[in-house]
Amino acid sequence: MPLYMDVHSLDGGVAVEDVAKAHMADLQTQAAYDVKYLRYWVSPEEGKVFCLVEAPSIAAANTVHREAHGLVAESVYAVQEGS
């Protein structure tokens, strides 16, 4: 399944706790779309959130975010994992 990294930019910063809640909402929604949100990273002061997701398409990944909490990523990149 394709692997994607998405990027969210939130004006005024973001609380790590709020991102954790949004991630939990993604986990509760993802199965309906054959999506698996794997990990996320937060830069609180900059208001940046990065999500790593396996999904059949960018549209499917965005649909999960939209339905789970409404915060759709501004950018999504196809990525390959390295070590």
Image (tube, rainbow, N blue to C red):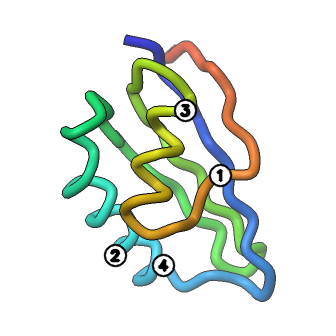
Q: Are marks 3 and 2 in contact (CB under 8 Å)?
A: no
Q: Can you tell which quarter of the image residue 45 is in? A: bottom right
Q: Secondary structure at mark 2?
A: helix
Q: CA distance from mark 4 to mark 2?
A: 9 Å
Q: Which of the two discs, 4 and 1, sits closer to the camera?
A: 1
Q: Which residue is mark 4?
A: 16
Do tag 2 and tag 1 residues touch (Cβ < 8 Å)? Answer: no
Residue named by callout 3: 59
Mark 1 lies on residue: 73
Quick one: label 4 or label 2, which is nearer the N terminus?
A: 4
The three-letter code of the residue at mark 1 reads Ala
Quadrant placement of the N terminus: top left
Callouts 4 and 2 close, C-beta under 8 Å: no
Q: Which residue is mark 2?
A: 21
Closer to the chain start, of discs 3 and 2, is 2
Q: Earlier in the sequence, mark 4 or mark 3?
A: 4
Query: In which quadrant of the rendered view does residue 59 lie?
Result: top right
Which amino acid, mark 4?
A: Val
Above/below status of 82 relative to 17: above
**Secondary-structure class at tag 3:** helix
Q: Residues within 10 Å of mark 4 (few under 14, many from 20)?
A: some
Kindly state the secondary structure of the residue where label 4 is placed: helix
Horizontal relation, residue 5 to residue 39: left or right: right
Which numbered mark, 4 or 3, is in the foreground of this view? 3
Q: Earlier in the sequence, mark 4 or mark 1?
A: 4
Disc 3: CA contacts within 10 A as few (<14), some (14-19) or many (>=20): few
Q: In percent of the image, x 54 and y 85: which residue is there?
A: 15
